């Protein structure tokens, strides 16, 4: 059996558990993204969409837009499509290799990278492709965690190995520089409060069920181990939203070149003329056990 990379193994667990793929900063980041999307946007792309939560939220808020979620991982896209059907979402999902993406996402009004850039080894190539695919004046909404200078190196190394990260930018300046080298002009940088995952009652019940099912204990522990690491990292990082565009450079709100590493925490209320759907969230259940069994079988291929 082919040996899985740590990145592939992580995504196999996400697919098995049908996890909600929140961007850096969670719900606060999602609200910031929705507030920044122009009301007239017609084509919105969720790049590296994972299980599609961001895509579905955007599709509900902007029903007039074509919302496309793209990802290279077939299991992730299968889950995204299944949940979209169950929620009656208008978002569409495509499993596409990076080299073929321009055929699908060209002339986009908005491209969202909800943390996906961290999984690419060559970010400059990624952002150059994004710049080519945006229409003139189009927006890139790029979500990142930026780490404190005193974060223990051992934690960052453990994060890289456990999640299979590629690009680990050296601070905010590094991210902005790559954007600019790719031909994108950063117009706004927003720092959000530190984000901690809540251990909800539903999550505790799900873990309890998994531990009661034969051969599922290992899967539950694999994700619990990653959550424990995320909890440690949460004390050493802030989520950032960078909004960049093609064309002329805009003025970043309150951020100068020297201040990029010390952006004031955003405290303004987020408003938007987005449309809110009356549809409520639906929990996908149909193929949970099939995906979970698949993830367990894949464990033997993970070193």
Image: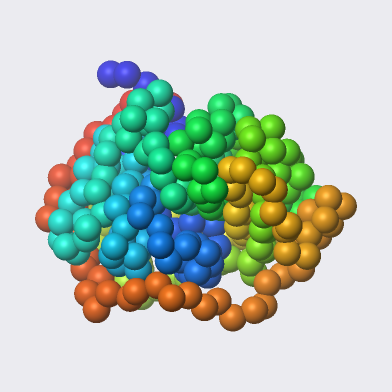
Whether residue 27 can be seen here:
yes
In the rendered image of this protein, does residue 247 appear above or below residue 195?
A: above
Give the image location of residue 143, x and y in percent.
56, 52
User: Colour scheme used in the picture?
Assistant: rainbow
Give the image location of residue 45, x and y in percent.
39, 47
**The C terminus is located in which quarter?**
top left
The quarter of the picture where residue 13 lies is top left
The quarter of the picture where residue 267 lies is bottom right
Of 101 and 212, the residue lying toward us = 101
Give the image location of residue 64, x and y in percent.
29, 62
Of 140 and 216, the residue lying toward us = 140
The residue at the point 26 percent across, 54 percent down is: 91
In-image side of 86 versus 230 (left or right): left
Of 303 and 33, the residue lying toward us = 33
In the rendered image of this protein, does residue 76 appear above or below residue 303?
A: below
Of 41 and 88, the residue lying toward us = 41
The residue at the point 35 percent across, 26 percent down is: 100
The residue at the point 62 percent across, 53 percent down is: 242
Whether residue 295 can be seen here:
no
Outermost residue toward the top in this view: 1
The residue at the point 51 percent across, 48 percent down is: 138
Outermost residue toward the left in this view: 286
In-image side of 182 versus 60 (left or right): right
In the rendered image of this protein, does residue 238 appear above or below residue 103?
A: below
In-image side of 203 versus 260 (left or right): left
**The N terminus is located in which quarter?**
top left
């Amino acid at each position: 059996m082919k040996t899985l990379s740590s990145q592939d193994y992580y995504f196999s667990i996400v697919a098995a558990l049908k996890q909600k793929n929140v961007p850096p900063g969670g719900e606060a980041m999602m609200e910031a993204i929705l507030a920044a999307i122009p009301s007239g946007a017609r084509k919105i792309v969720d790049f590296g969409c994972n299980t599609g939560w961001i895509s579905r939220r955007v599709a509900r808020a902007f029903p007039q837009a074509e919302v496309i979620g793209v990802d290279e991982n077939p299991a992730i896209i299968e889950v995204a499509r299944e949940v979209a059907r169950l929620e009656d979402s208008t978002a569409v999902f495509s499993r596409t290799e990076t080299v073929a993406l321009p055929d699908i996402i060209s002339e986009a009004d908005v491209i969202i990278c909800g943390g996906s850039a961290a999984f690419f080894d060559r970010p400059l190539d990624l952002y150059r492709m994004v710049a080519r695919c945006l229409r003139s004046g189009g927006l890139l909404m790029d979500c990142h965690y930026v780490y404190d200078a005193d974060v223990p190196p051992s934690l960052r190394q453990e994060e890289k190995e456990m999640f299979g990260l590629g690009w680990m930018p050296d601070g905010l300046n590094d991210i902005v520089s790559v954007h600019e080298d790719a031909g994108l002009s950063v117009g706004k940088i927003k720092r959000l409060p530190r984000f901690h995952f809540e251990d909800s009652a539903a999550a505790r019940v799900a873990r309890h069920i998994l531990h009661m099912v034969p051969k599922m204990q290992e899967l539950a522990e694999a994700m619990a181990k990653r959550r424990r690491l995320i909890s440690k990292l949460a004390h050493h990082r802030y989520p950032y939203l960078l909004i960049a565009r093609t064309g002329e450079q805009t003025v970043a709100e309150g951020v100068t070149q020297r201040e990029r590493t010390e952006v004031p925490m955003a405290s303004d209320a987020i408003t938007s003329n987005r449309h809110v759907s009356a549809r409520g969230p639906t929990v996908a259940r149909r193929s949970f056990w099939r995906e979970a069994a698949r993830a367990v079988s894949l464990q033997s291929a993970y070193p």
